[in-house]
Image (tube, rainbow, N blue to C red):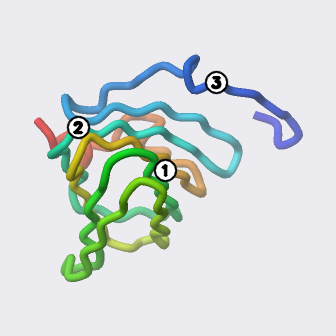
Amino acid sequence: MSSKEITHHRWSDIPLETVTHMIDRKIITGDGMMIAQIFLKKGAIVPRHQHHNEQITYVLEGVLRFYLGEDESRVVDVAAGEVLHISAWAWHRAEALADTLDVDIFSPPRQDWLDKTDDYLRSGNK
């Protein structure tokens, strides 16, 4: 995509990708950032991981419990209307305490999500 290109998207036109039986997502990618809608069923687990991407998570519906840090000693519940910023390389995992819809923004885009090599996520809810 050219950095001068302007594109318009409708979430309703973006295909829903089933990641696991507990997690679905829709992704829109630009040159240097990515936005994704994440649909998590109650009890869904995002296993502990880290990545070089800076992340902002905005919960629209439901609640996500995040376990932060290498030892997961910091626990933060992020409810509808709340935002969590995760710095690059910060360890984190999450659990959906209710059916949840969140919007994740990454910079740069998550290449592992685009090429479907995000095995840490796909193996967490089998």
Place of residue 111 in the rendered image (x, y in percent of width and height, measured from the top left): 49, 45
Q: Secondary structure at mark 2?
A: loop
Q: Farthest residue toward the right?
A: 4
Q: Which amino acid type corresponds to the residue marked 2 in the rendered image?
A: Lys
As drawn, 80 above or below 90? above
Q: Quadrant of residue 31?
A: top right
- Numbered label tally: 3
How far apart marks 2 and 3 lie (CA) works out to 23 Å
Residue 48 image offset from top left, x and y in percent: 23, 62
- In which quadrant of the rendered view does residue 101 lie? top left
Residue that appears at 19% across and 50% down: 45
Closest to the observer: 73 or 49?
73
Label 1, on which residue?
A: 104
Percent position (x, y) of residue 55?
A: 50, 61
Above or below for 92 versus 16:
below
For the point 21% across and 76% down, which residue is it?
Answer: 72
- Mark 2 burial class by Cα count in 10 Å: few <14, some 14-19, many 20+: some
